Amino acid sequence: MNETRYESSRTRLAIGAFTATLHRDLVVTGREFVQFLVQALMQPIFFLFIFGKVLPSIGLAAQGFTALLLPGIVALSSMLASLQGVTLPLVLDLGYAREIDDRLLAPQPAWVVAFEKLLIASVRGTIAGLTIFPVGALILGHAFAVRTDRIPALALMIVLTAATGAAIGLLMGTVIKPEQISLMFTLIFTPLIFTGCTYYPWPALEHIRWFQAITMINPLTYCSEGLRYAMVPGNIPTMMFGWVVVALIVGIALCTWAGTRTFLKRVVS
């Protein structure tokens, strides 16, 4: 009886600590919302303007290219916002100052700290992805076109994209050292962006088989293709939506598991 009460008390304390930490991070995100939006939207705004507005207007890109580009920009924005939202704070928290210790002193298991960071990063990524729609409508004007008969698939893909970025960020943030942050942007972000089918549909690469195979290693490819299935009007060829969802769920599970393991090793050492 006493043991049951003890376990129940521990569970309530852990839930209370998790809720308080999550609330604190949401408040911080709200206070820094303008800064967050600038950081999340600066690159997508220029991509949409140059590749979606300028190039089609001067005849250097087909008019239908804008519809194929927009889902890739949504995927890129959502994934990068969530990835950066957990990677950079974790790298700093696990650095020499060990700022993570403040959270570890709370009455909750250490893995809950990692899960909370993953959750708040997913929220940031979801917000970044949703913000692209009004921004895209403003920049693209009459060229903005999103189908409305696959809203559930669109909502699912935005959440999965944000969660994928957060899971990858959790793993990267526990592996990368503070002095390697600048190298991370060069060696990881650049290939991630340009091999993730952001600017082109995956089936169109059938004549470049070796590059098509490389893009399948990039999780951003599955996010971009799933969003194209949900967003682009008409029946354009994309990856099978069912396989996209399965691949992303498996990827999220594996990265979360690996990231949590490395997180626990780092906080214990």
Image (cartoon, helix red, strand yellow):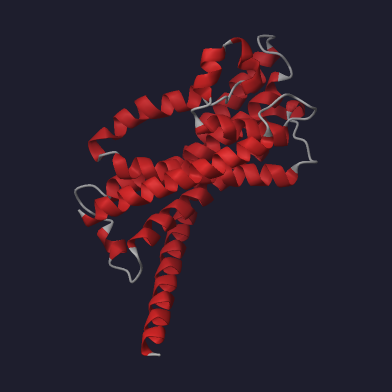
Question: Can residue 201 be seen at all in this image of the molecule?
Answer: no
Res 9 → quadrant: bottom left
Residue 123 position, x and y percent, is 53, 51
* Residue at 26% in and 51% down: 265
As drawn, 157 above or below 225:
below
Left or right of residue 85: residue 158 = right
Above or below: residue 15 compared with residue 245: below
Q: Nearer the viewer, residue 31 or 262?
A: 262
| Residue 135 shown left or right of residue 250 in the figure | right
Which residue occupies 31% across, 45% down? 174
At horizontal 65% and vertical 9% (from top left) the residue drawn is: 60
- Vertical comparison of 63 with 71: above or below: above
Q: Name the quarter where the N terminus is drawn.
A: bottom left
Q: Position of residue 137 (x, y in %)?
A: 70, 34
> Which residue is drawn at the image coordinates 48% and 41% (left, top)?
165
Asked if residue 10 lies left or right of residue 247, the reply is left
Depth check, front residue: 177 or 237? 237
Q: Position of residue 122 (x, y in %)?
A: 51, 49
Q: Quadrant location of residue 115? A: bottom left
Which residue lies most toward the bottom here? Answer: 1
